[in-house]
Image: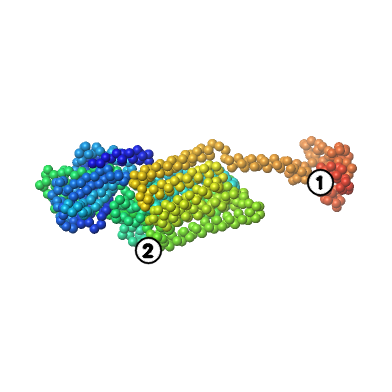
Amino acid sequence: MRSSTGVKGLLPLACLATSVLGGNILSTSGFSQCMEGGTVQVKNLDVSYDKDSRVLTFDVAGTSDKVQNVTAELVVTAYGKIVYTKDFSPCDTGMPQMCPVPAASFASQGNQTIPENYASQIPAIAFSIPDLDGLVKMQLKDADTGENVACVESTVGNGQTLQTPIISYVAVGMAAAALLLSGLAGIAAGGHPGASSPSPTFGEVIGWFQGLAMNGMMSVQYPQVYRSFTANFAFSTGLVPWGQLQTGIDNFRARTGGNLTSDSYEYLKNNATLVYSDGSGNTTTSGKLVRRALETVLLWTRDGTSVTVNGTSANIGEDSGSSSNTTSSGNTRENHLVSGIQGYVEQLQIPSSNTFLTVLLVFAIICGAIIVVILLFKVILEAWSMFGNIPKSMESWRKRYWWRLAKALTNLILLLYGTWTLYCIFQFTSGDSWAAKILAGVTLGLFTAVLAFFSWRIYTKAHQYKQLEGDASKLYEDKDTWVKYNLFYENYKKGYWWLFVPVIVYMFAKGCVIAGANGHGLVQTAGQLIVEAVMLIVLLWARPFQRRSGNWINIFIQVVRVISVVCILIFVEELGISQTTKTITGIILIVVQCILTGLLAILLVVNALINCIRENPHRKARKAAEKNKLERDLDDLTPLDARNSLLMEPMAQRPGVPGPPPYSDRKGRYDPVPRDHSPALGSERSLSRPPRFGREDDGARLVSDAASMGRRNDRSVSRSPDRQPTLPDVYGRAH
């Protein structure tokens, strides 16, 4: 027996990914033929091992084309390395019915006890580590010629996996928290033009989760632990496992040209065992399965074994003389070979041909919920306005709720556009329902048209503002424009308002590369690496976000995306990298992505605390602007300014008010300034001479007198000797 030291060296790394309380059972999960044209065909293979009782339970069945003596070679691999091998003959294990193998159907089942010295060699962590990565393979050879006559291999698992609802619930909670904080930030801004949301925003969190999900959709040789990890984020792309929904979609497909034989919810649930290929389309040779097992020892002893040939059974062991008509229970589940997008969605029990329709119905449900919530809020505001005074900000919302509704739906389209492109193209290439293909084409064209329309409108507005004012700052300063279109560029600096267009192109390109090159892992990975690297270069060059935190967070997210694609390149079958390296890379990738996800969660908590503690920055900015405006207004007051106190109150004496203002007569009137005197010279005549009104030129004199006030006497005399500046008799004109 070979040592398992190499496998034990990988176990501490695997523990970094997660800590899962496992059971004490190791069992096979399906099987596949690793040889074509063999004279012996295995029809069933079901083996399980209980750690507590050290009992191995097996159920094997098959057929043979001719009578022949065979020997068997059992090979157990873990993470691509052979950890156990054993050669034996059915004749040496006390099964005379199988020595030689008859030209008939045969089956063997029973319970066998593994000796303690062998059972102790199985690491305890093998029963708790999630998504074991190993393989058990048995080859039957002709005892006389040594030629292979059969080959079968199977995966082993302990029931533990990283595809767990807990991770999905945590991710959903993060997305909900980001949505709530983004909404509160918008309400706090009060529609203030130019106000940006703190990072991470709802769109950034959902975009990160979508990236994790799309990383698991490429046609490469993933370690099973990483495939299971990425499945937890399928909700962000619109994939929600729902049995009744899938049954309804199956019925729709059946009426519109779909084939449900091996592509339906019932088939996946009851009859199929998923076996992942390497993504190249060749799934008939050994060594191209993604699922592996960690370590187990299949030992043949003589305890309680039952062998059946053509329905006649005999118990092998100490009491081998007894017989019965026991047959193999049989495993009715078939091996279903999958890869790429199909493998990703079908592990969620969503048939590949149902993928687009599932996303479409989930999208329709979300749209319906948004419409109901907005209309309900509209009804509440209408009732509020009937029985009281609603705030000014809510009044604006009440009057423009249709636009708010359209904006919310457009935002949803923008969030899903990349994955929507992926699913539509996948439906075009792999779907079987003509109706689903038509819906995919119509919706993709509609979504693209909506985004193109808004892009054109924003560009048109920016072009108009540039012509009038030299730049596009009005996109941020004009409230009406801001309320309509800010969802596309609100977090960008004024000079980079246009960056939302490259972002839309980036999302479209990602969906096209993954779906268009489905089945070609190297092409997918290379294309994704180019797309992600170009976006990283754009972010590093422009640093377009208004907030410094937004720049750093988005650049960090993009760096991790590029690193993720580089790691996925290691999983490509054509590069021939060892399984051990792939598994270690997968675990490291999980750790890195979990760290970034945790940092995003911490930042969400920090943003929530900041919003609760400090004063709203938008309100503070508005107060400062109002204060500065008031100070400027007080500095530039003139005697004729409408804000001047002389024009705000009559100057005549009234009951209860002290005497007339200084430098006026008893009626509060002022004397005109004489031509040869000015107030600056202190002439008493200029302050005591009463004004004269009633002539036709009173209005002209009033304007000319006011215009000459404050000028030096010598200049006013020299330039216009006939001008006599006077102060306006406001009180007299009023009477």
Can residue 367 be seen here?
no
Identify the colour scheme used: rainbow
Q: Secondary structure at mark 1?
A: helix
Q: Nearer the viewer, residue 162 or 268?
A: 162
**How many numbered callouts?**
2
Q: Nearer the viewer, residue 311 or 635?
A: 311
**What residue is rendered at 31% in x and 59% in y?**
261
Left or right for 653, reference 135: right
Across and down, in percent, residue 520 comes to 39, 55
Quarter residue 548 falls in: top right
**What residue is rendered at 52% in x and 54% in y?**
406
**Residue 256: numbered disc:** 2
The tag earlier along the polypeptide, 1 or 2, is: 2
Left or right for 312, reference 554: left
**What residue is rendered at 88% in x and 46% in y?**
718
Quarter residue 342 falls in: bottom left
Can residue 703 be seen here?
yes
Query: Alpha carbon of mark 1 to alpha carbon of mark 2: how far?
Result: 86 Å
**What residue is rendered at 88% in x and 48% in y?**
722
Up the image or down, 110 lies above or below 520; here it is above
How many other residues sit within 10 Å of disc 2, few (<14), some (14-19) or many (≥20)?
some
The residue type indicated by label 1 comes to Ala
Give the residue number, with chain letter if any, for mark 1. Answer: 706
Closer to viewer: mark 1 or mark 2: 2
The residue type indicated by label 2 comes to Thr
Across and down, in percent, residue 506 comes to 49, 53
